[in-house]
Image (spheres, grey):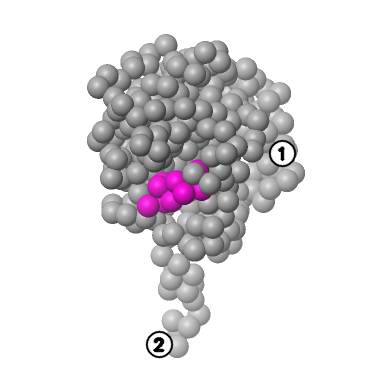
Amino acid sequence: MEFKQMTIEDIPAMAKLLIERQNLESRVFPFLKNSNLHVNYITDLLAGWFTNKQMIGIGAFINSELVGYIIGELKHDTVRGRHIWGHYEGVAIRADQSPELIRSLYAKASEAWVAQGCFMHYMLIPLGNQVYYDACQRLSFFIQQVHGVMSMADYQPFENVSDAEVRVAHKMDSTTLGKMSSIIQSYQNAAPTFEPVLPEAVLEIKAGYEGIVEGNDETCLIAIKDMKELGFQVYYPSMSNLMTPDNSVELSVAGTYDVQMGKGIGKKLMNEGYRLMKEKGYSTMVTDWRITNLASSTFWPKCGFKPVAYRMVRYIDSNIAWANFDNPSLKLL
């Protein structure tokens, strides 16, 4: 087996492996056999990566034939710093190959990633075939985010819900939504998630929430009782891709004040959201949540969302950049 850096010339072979991977995924999740599962879409997607993004990846070849690859995008932002982002389409192996190939590919690719100063590695891992998840676990990756899909036909409306009013938000609700913009951040910031809250991000998110009602595509629901806002949900039409079913709607953001938890407010919002989205003709609903957020990771599965992918992360001690046996200073000790 030969390991080589992936280039734009490898796109046809990568597309072939990815289609094979997704055909296996669709046996477990039939809704993933969607309109994008064809060579033209995948070829264009991969070509866009190599043309417009800084991609670093490794392929495994047997007799000049690609049997597996792993590729990640080098990114930099104020939250994650310099890091590698592995897209959902960023890893695939041929069905006849050992799962150990995934670990070998990561060993080769991660060396190049660390050499670029990327010590945080994110990967979106498919769950239809457990070999990808198992391999990542054995590489010391951990689950950070869950991506779930719910079939509208399978939804069971909640009983014993709140008596709060749930209505569609309008432009006059901009200030109210801004006040609720801290709900999700508060849950993420608290135990056991412990996600930092940067001051500049708080203001940016607040402005984003205030602007939700300015768009034309969203459906925003607000739960109100005694003229006080209690919680909300926001829905957007989904862009279909390999991880997202056709004709789906995204439950983009949702939250209930912690003092209102356990009163059936989220359940009533979910019932109303389901009713409205069904009337609009959607067949599936997608959402995602932080697995360490106890409120989210217990409520969304109760609604019927089933995980189809995990965002998994590995943090590498940055001291490895100098604390290694290639460091010439060791000769001075």
Identified by mark 2, the residue type is: Leu
Q: Residue at x 65, y 30 (%)?
A: 216
Instruction: Please check the rendered image and state whether residue 85 is part of the magenta-colored stretch, yes or no.
Output: no
Task: Please check the rendered image and state whether residue 183 is part of the magenta-colored stretch, yes or no.
Answer: yes
Query: Residue at point 36% right, 34% down?
Result: 225
Q: Nearer the viewer, residue 101 or 256?
A: 256
Q: Amino acid at mark 1?
A: Gly
Q: Nearer the viewer, residue 146 or 183?
A: 183
Circle 2 residue = 333
On the image, the x and y values in percent for residue 245 come to: 54, 21
Residue 39 visible, this angle: yes
Is disc 1 placed on a helix, strand or loop? Answer: helix
SS for dot 2 = loop
| Residue positioned 60% across, 54% down in the render | 75
| Helix, strand or loop: magenta stretch | helix
- Percent position (x, y) of residue 91? 53, 37
Residue placed under numbered mark 1 in the picture: 48
